[in-house]
Image (tube, helix red, strand yellow):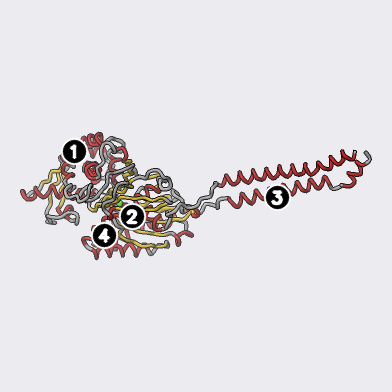
Amino acid sequence: MDDQPEMKAKNPWHRPRIIFITVLFVIGIVSMVAIGVVQNKPLHQKYKYGIVLDAGSSHTSVYIYQWPAEKENNTGMVQQMDACNVPGVGISGYSTEPNRAGDSLKSCMDKARSIIPNHRHPETPVYLGATAGMRLLEMKNAAASEKVLESVERVLQTYPFSYQGARIISGQEEGAFGWITVNYLNESLRQASGTLGALDLGGASTQITFVSGQKQESPDNSIDFRLYGHDYHVYTHSFLCYGKDQVLKLSLANEIRPVHTKTETIVVEDPCFHPGYRMNKNFQSVFNSPCVTGLSYPEKNFVHMGSGNGTKCHAAVRKVFNDSGCSYSICSFNGIFQPRVEGQFGAFSAFFFVMDFLNLTTLSLDEAKEELGKYCATPWEIIKQNHPNVKEKYLAEYCFSGTYILTLLEDGYNFTSHNWQDIKFIKKIGNSDAGWTLGYMLNLTNMIPAESPDTPPLPYGGYVTLMVLFAVMILLLGLLACKVFRRPTGSAQKEII
Ligand SMILES: Nc1nc2c(ncn2[C@@H]2O[C@H](COP(=O)(O)OP(=O)(O)OP(=O)(O)O)[C@@H](O)[C@H]2O)c(=O)[nH]1
Ligand SMILES: [Ca+2]
């Protein structure tokens, strides 16, 4: 019994030492958690930017993209920040006064300079890609197309961005990059699930691109991609002259030729324009394109008169497709190889705004044909009354454009009423427009890796939780150790007693 006070006297620092060790533990654990949390905390979000000019046949659009600086190789990270429509015609429309092509870009480029933070300007790449309008100008007048490209280059180089070049992209690139864009935005590239085919309808060309499991019989139409660790065998074709403006010229030319040989006053009755539509036009406007061959009397005029008949319009549009001469096992039209369409498709550009205007985007093929027939037969005066705010040039052409779209999809690409619902008419995915520009930039900036990039196994919140759990466990273990450390003293006392 007398030993007890002796024991206490032997160990006067026992209690303070436990308190000291506990405090040290707590400080250590708090520091550990703090370091762990700060170390793994995502940096303050910094954005990078890129600019792509889509120099199309009918107009130019300037797209500004942005993405978080430290996540550029992740799918779905690059988003459209702004899109600016350049006023006036496409750059190929300035063939006779090339300097104006460059000047036309200034308002949208000024806007880009004002919305991208100044300190990012020098590292922001600028690309200009020209499509079918410039392809046609190059065929017709190579010197003029050269001058137009020089003019846009001169102007783009005056901006504080990192200018990366202005060039005419091939139809194959246009199709492939459109496909990459929709699948990147749809986040289908990192999943083994199906991809979206891409259908793009412009003013001067149209593209069809999709993954096909069937035998690729034509190397020109086949592209292999390895993206995020997956292999894709993609079919693509671009039909030059099959954009909706050029097909309108082609089909008008078909209607002018027989009439012209018979009469002096040329009246062209057109089932693809509304009854009551009547407009004086000149030959030049139809026969000025390398897509249209034959007659060339630029001084002559004709009266373009609508008769509004859906069935006859379909028959007239059908004539621009040549179904003979397929040297493969299967073709779309004009002797071009195309395997059977497979999977879901996103149809954008003019496919969307024509079908959307006509309210045909959600109908079946048969319903769409029926509605379009009624629309074409509606008198021009009524159409104008119903849409007072739509530009007359656009308004007059919707019957033709809608008929062309249905004909191209059904008779050209061989969609049927069974797989019609696989076509989704889209303008945007998220905030970004569907089109070739995003895919073009992703490719040129190496933002889509062939192999899947390593991602942290846990999100930030996961690291914090783990650190706290570890800290609590260590604290509990520490306390337990303290208790165990005290026990032998107690049992020693008992033994002494
Ligand atoms: N109705 C309507 N038509 C439009 C609109 N924007 C463009 N178009 C027309 O639709 C057609 C296709 O437009 P885009 O897809 O911009 O074609 P593009 O890129 O200039 O032409 P490509 O070089 O062949 O790709 C052209 O005839 C345009 O005049 C719109 O907002 N409404
Ligand atoms: Ca286009």
Q: Which type of secondary structure does the marked residue at label 3 adopt? A: helix
> x, y (%) of residue 212?
32, 47
Residue linked to disc 4: 94
**Residue 80 at least partly seen:** no
> x, y (%) of residue 143?
24, 65
The disc at residue 54 is 2
Q: Which of 60 and 477 is in front in this view?
A: 477
- Report the Cα–Cα distance between label 1 and label 3: 81 Å
Ligand 2 under 8 Å from disc 2 Cβ: yes
Residue linked to disc 3: 28
Residue linked to disc 1: 310
**Residue 218 at least partly seen:** yes
Which one is closest to the eye, mark 4 or mark 3?
Answer: 3
Q: Earlier in the sequence, mark 4 or mark 1?
A: 4
Q: Earlier in the sequence, mark 2 or mark 4?
A: 2
Look at label 1 and name its amino acid. Answer: Gly
> x, y (%) of residue 163?
39, 62
Look at label 2 and name its amino acid. Answer: Asp
> x, y (%) of residue 50?
42, 56
* Residue depicted at x 89% and y 47%: 10
Compared to 289, does 349 lie above or below? Answer: above
Classed neighbour count for the residue bearing mark 2: other residues with Cα under 10 Å, few (<14), some (14–19), many (≥20): many
Compared to 344, does 152 lie above or below? Answer: below
Which one is closest to the eye, mark 2 or mark 4?
Answer: 2
